[in-house]
Amino acid sequence: MIPEAEIWQITALSLRISLTATGLSLFLGLPLGTWLALGRFRGQTFLLSLINTGMGLPPVVVGLVVAMLLWRSGPLGGLNLIYTPTAIVIAQTLIALPVVTGLTASALQQLDVRLQWQLAGLGASRVQMVLVLWREARLPILAALMAGFGAVISEVGASMMVGGNIKGQTRVLTTAIVLETSRGAFDRALALGALLLGLTFLVNWGLTLLQQRGRR
Amino acid sequence: MKPLLEVHRLCVPRNAHFAVQVERLTVYAGETLVLIGPNGAGKTTLLLGLARILKATQGSLRLNGEEIRDDLTYRRHLGLVLQDALLVSTTVWNNVALGLRFRGLPAAEIRQRTRRWLERLGVAHLAGRPATQLSGGEARRVSLARALALEPTLLLLDEPFAGLDAPTRERLREDFHAILSETRTTAILVTHELEEACTLATRVAVMLAGRVVQVGPVQEVFARPVNAAVGAYLRRLGAEERAAYS
């Protein structure tokens, strides 16, 4: 039996880590996706292909790379981040970033190109134009955010590799499920799984409400 | 008449295969210059080049005698109305106020101008309605109000009445004509409609294959086409118009 306090601690940590990673991926992915969608430069299609490939990036590969970087003897080992929640946030941000970036770029490219002409013709500066375009594409951009959150809250490989599944410190819902399953405690694993699903539903419900309000 | 916009040796590429090239074109203050020409002649490309939205690879533009250096400053002298209304998904009021907000005008002035132009275009009763719920004619009126609210030095219009049914188009055109006369706004208008050109134009400019081949008062251009290609195009335009009305 897992103590109730520990369950709440694991749940809160899962939520905190995945929301932070999703927020960071939005902060970085929104401008990056905008640049890829609206910019005109050499290598643009190649970069978009890279980002689209990154949308299917296996979390264990991300975990491996981040673990190698943060390992005590690694290039960023001096930061002492391996097996900390921050390490999991870094790995999850890298998993969500291509999803948010790629879907943002796709959302903006679906807008009528003449809308950019029209806004320019109304005297919009570059920043003003981007703000209006984000607003016009807010529904698919929110969908991108949901996809990013879905990718990180459900991943286990990277969290396990860079977090270490340390009780009370880096154990999150997915890694706890893996642990309970390996112990043969399927009832506890199932309960944690239901909690994870419920949590994912609640966050996506909130984002969907926001998205559907934007339709009006 | 005083020159407002002077175009000299302008080259605006649309793609790898097509560019508009204008040796010399002057738009005078207070006039309505109507650009006519067959599909693919480059009218929209020229309009977007004049708005500095499509980049010119060479040539110069002078507004009120001054070379244009900063695109944003220049564009804030313009009003642009494209073929589709291209309203953003917010209320009609916010759409009309959009360009005024881009310019950072005081809130009271934005309110006053937005109200005035919504009323002038007869769409004040739609102010609170989402722009996505408008009919075609209403959307065009809002898009005209949005451009006119800027009180532009130069108004650029790309077939602003295209696709509307005949009675709606006629009413809107009449209103627009009255507004241009009242405000003495200088305008460049692209159209395919002979009647529109005849009603609105101070002068017409005929474009063929990316070049402005003849500019002059409507009657003069129709009476004395500069070459056989212009003559053939104008005859075709007249025949299409007659067929449309018969």
Image (cartoon, coloured by chain):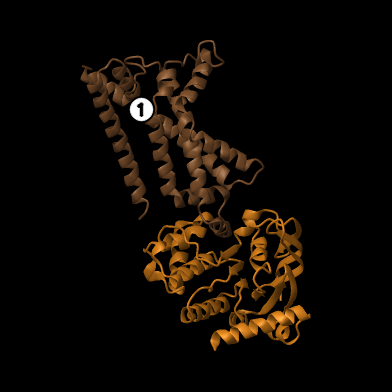
Q: Confirm whether residue A31 shows in the render.
A: yes
Residue depicted at x 70% and y 75%: B205
Give above or below for B105 relative to A173: below
- Which of these two is toward me, B152 or A69? A69
Any idea which chain is the brown one in this picture? Answer: A
Chain B rendered in what hue?
orange
- Residue plotted at (66% across, 75% down): B36
Percent of width and height locating residue A169: 35, 16
Q: Which residue is mark 1?
A: A16
**Can residue B67 be seen in the rendering of this structure?**
no
Q: Amino acid at mark 1?
A: Arg
The residue shown at (28%, 15%) is A183
Percent across and percent down for residue A146 are 39, 39
Where disc 1 sits, the SS reads helix
Q: Quadrant of the C terminus of chain B?
A: bottom right
Residue closer to the observer: A70 or B182: A70
Quarter of the image for residue B127 reads bottom left
